[in-house]
Image: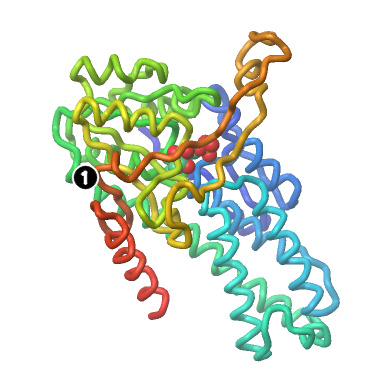
Amino acid sequence: MSEPIDTLWLDEEANEVKYIDQTKLPNELVVKSTINLDEMYRAIEKLEVRGAPAIGVFAALSMYVIAANITAQTLGDYVKEYIRCSNHLETARPTAVNLSWALGEMIKELNRFTNNRFDCSLHSKSLDSIELDDTLRDSITYVLKKKALTIWENNINECKAIGENGLRFIHDGDGILTHCNAGRLATVRYGTATAPIYLSHEKGMNIKVFCDETRPLLQGARLTAYELMESGIDTTLQCDNMVASLMASGQINSVFVGCDRIASNGDVANKIGTSGVAIIARHYGIPVYVCGPTSSIDMSIATGEDIVIEQRNGSEVTKMWYNSEMSHKNVKVYNPAFDVTSHELITAIITEKGVAWPDYKSGLETLMGQVDSIRRE
Ligand code: MRU
């Protein structure tokens, strides 16, 4: 079996971002390239690139490519244009914190660069008097490229570590249910919820994975089933409304899902339907593991009530997968893209830094403390 290609990467020769267009899977493997802000925005909005960590990495690579193409006469104008593009990209989708996290990391890098060199703040007027010659432009571009590539590479290593940290929760013979796609397509490689699954498969464990189809955009049917099948894993697809029946049948030992934003109390926003899965799992005494990098943790919010949930177009429910409109054309449609699973329903949160257990507040604080100290080193 050949190694799958990465979900997205920087083509350093062409200075373009390359990514798999996930709207075309599983029937076609289409790789797109872009250097254009509007295309980048649309790629995120239309879910050509999707999954919280992948969106973050894509945004970081995109901002490097955009920065490399900014034509400004002064450093002040350069920074203004950079911030304008970054702010625009940030509005493409609201729920996954990885998008604003990655854009923030890139801005911090630019800020650090201007501070170190010019000893002035990002919005300082004194930047306006600094001419942007080729040497200065090359230095900024170098710094931003290095940062974007670090975010890309870190994502690979983080997913690997999530796999290692999550492996102990999988046992030979297990049936594992997953919702949406928290697989390699939602990251650069390996995935989050799928990382322990891939690792257990690699170690020769006999596991069976059950994918929820994930209405309305079918990430489970189109993407998770595809990538697991391509990896030779025993995979079964079921509709979302079959979860209770499946759990009642005794075939499920654990639930592994990803996350788009984790609040400081451990509430988790993830693909719509995740909270329902967790409620049913609690009824049947099945553990629920949430997997994600620490960049998905938002310690600035107290609970899941503070998470903005994206509402998407109703046509995704009534039309997208049908030859013609399948519902009354004027019916109102409720189409939130995510829901919040209460921390009370989550058995453990698996990150690259380790595992957080209830009480999540202190567990997550400890994990984030480790991240901060690594950044300070
Ligand atoms: O709307 P999507 O497809 O971007 O939603 C993706 C999910 O909800 C994933 O489970 C989540 O982003 C984690 S991906 C590792």
Determine which quarter of the picture holds residue 153. Answer: bottom left
x and y percentages locating residue 77 in the rendered image:
81, 74
- Residue beneath the point at 27% across and 29% down: 281
- Residue beneath the point at 49% across and 57% down: 152
Position of residue 92 relative to residue 271, above or below, is below
Determine which quarter of the picture holds residue 314. Answer: top right
Look at mark 1 in the image and give the residue it sits on: 167
Position of residue 334 relative to residue 354, above or below, is above
Q: Is residue 203 left or right of residue 365?
A: left
Q: Is residue 106 left or right of residue 360?
A: right
Q: Which residue is most to the right?
A: 73
Q: How many marks?
A: 1
x and y percentages locating residue 85 in the rendered image:
73, 59
Residue type for callout 1: Leu
> Can residue 153 be seen by looking at this rendering?
yes
Q: Secondary structure at mark 1?
A: helix
Determine which quarter of the picture holds residue 167. Answer: top left
x and y percentages locating residue 376 in the rendered image:
41, 79
Please tell me which residue lies in front, 191 or 146.
Answer: 191
Please tell me which residue lies in front, 320 or 347.
Answer: 347
Position of residue 10 relative to residue 221, above or below, is below
> Can residue 5 be seen by looking at this rendering?
no
Q: What is the quadrant of the N terminus in the image?
A: top left
Q: Is residue 109 left or right of residue 159?
A: right
Q: What is the quadrant of the C terminus in the image?
A: bottom left
- Residue beneath the point at 59% across and 67% down: 106
- Residue beneath the point at 23% across and 32% down: 254
Q: Which residue is most to the left?
A: 172
Q: Residues within 10 Å of mark 1 (few under 14, many from 20)?
A: some
x and y percentages locating residue 104 in the rendered image:
58, 65
